[in-house]
Image (cartoon, rainbow, N blue to C red):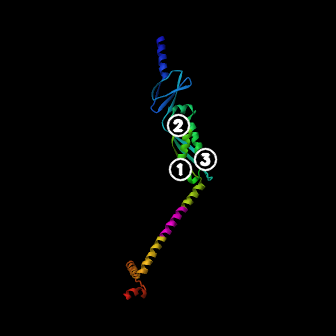
């Protein structure tokens, strides 16, 4: 019986002492309440009832930030949500400096999202989203650095606008398209008028060109219609030919 008891004790010792960590895991070892080392990956041997290990994952975490009610700088009420990408770079600080780094990062991301979006106007929030992303990432990375966390990227996913604002923006976009159409039409009229002015100068310099244009017009009309068309020919049109 004594041998059996010894074998059982040895088995229990190894079961409680041996830990295996995966490639993406690290173990923060506490000995009598004090941090002594960060180990892993692979086989880890602990002293039973003396050492305690806390596992920390080093993989990239994609955290969804719930939609936040935000009032922009120009007093527009919107809802904004985002996604934050971060990873643990210092397992010891992530375990010792903060109780729950996932919860703490989530809360910090929500407050930062509201704060940054509330400092800009709605047009800037829609058009300069990359700038907003970088600003939020910089703030989060600065505050989570003491926790041993590196924020690699922040993306604002969706901006929910009120229906009144959506209709207003639709009218604004339609007005902008009409303005561009009128500008293009006016530019075309200007170019056409410029060409006509150039043509008038050429005709003034060479009066025979008007007669040739007149004859060309008659030919075009006669080829398009089978009806008989009478054109009065002023004698002034033929005067250059008569003089020559």
The reply to whether the C-beta atoms of the residues labelled 1 and 3 are less than 8 Å apart is: no
Cα–Cα span, label 3 and label 2: 27 Å
Range drawn in magenta: 175-188
Residue 69, numbered circle: 3
222 and 200: which is toward the camera: 200
Place of residue 194 in the rendered image (x, y in percent of width and height, measured from the top left): 46, 73
Q: Is residue 240 above or below residue 161?
A: below
Residue extending farthest right: 75
Q: Earlier in the sequence, mark 1 or mark 3?
A: 3
Secondary element at image label 3: strand
Place of residue 224 in the rendered image (x, y in percent of width and height, measured from the top left): 39, 77
Q: Quadrant of the C terminus?
A: bottom left
The reply to whether the C-beta atoms of the residues labelled 3 and 2 are less than 8 Å apart is: no
Residue 129, numbered circle: 1
Cα–Cα span, label 1 and label 2: 24 Å
Q: Is residue 168 visible?
A: yes
The part of the image, by quadrant, that contains residue 213 is: bottom left
Q: Earlier in the sequence, mark 3 or mark 2?
A: 3
Cα–Cα span, label 1 and label 3: 17 Å
Q: Is residue 45 left or right of residue 164?
A: left
Which residue is labeled 2 in the image? 149
Q: Is residue 68 visible?
A: no
């Amino acid at each position: 019986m004594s041998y059996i008891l010894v074998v059982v004790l040895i088995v229990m010792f190894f079961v409680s002492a041996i830990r295996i960590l995966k490639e993406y895991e690290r173990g923060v070892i506490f000995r009598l309440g004090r941090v002594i080392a960060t180990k892993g990956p692979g086989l880890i041997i602990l002293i039973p009832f003396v050492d305690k290990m806390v596992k920390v994952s080093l993989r990239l975490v994609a955290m969804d930030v719930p939609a936040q009610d935000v009032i922009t700088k120009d007093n527009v009420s919107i809802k904004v949500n985002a996604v934050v990408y971060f990873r643990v770079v210092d397992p010891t600080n992530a375990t010792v400096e903060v109780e729950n780094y996932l919860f703490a990062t989530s809360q910090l991301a929500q407050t930062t999202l509201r704060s940054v979006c509330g400092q800009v106007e709605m047009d800037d929030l829609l058009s300069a989203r990359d700038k907003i992303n970088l600003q939020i990432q910089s703030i989060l990375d600065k505050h989570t650095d003491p926790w041993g966390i590196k924020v690699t990227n922040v993306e604002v996913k969706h901006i929910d606008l009120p229906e009144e604002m959506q209709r207003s923006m639709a009218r604004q976009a339609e007005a902008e398209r009409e303005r561009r159409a009128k500008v293009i039409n006016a530019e075309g009229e200007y170019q056409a008028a410029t060409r006509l002015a150039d043509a008038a100068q050429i005709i003034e310099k060479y009066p025979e060109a008007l007669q040739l244009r007149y004859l060309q017009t008659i030919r075009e009309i006669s080829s398009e219609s089978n009806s008989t068309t009478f054109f009065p020919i002023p004698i002034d049109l033929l005067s250059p030919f008569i003089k020559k």
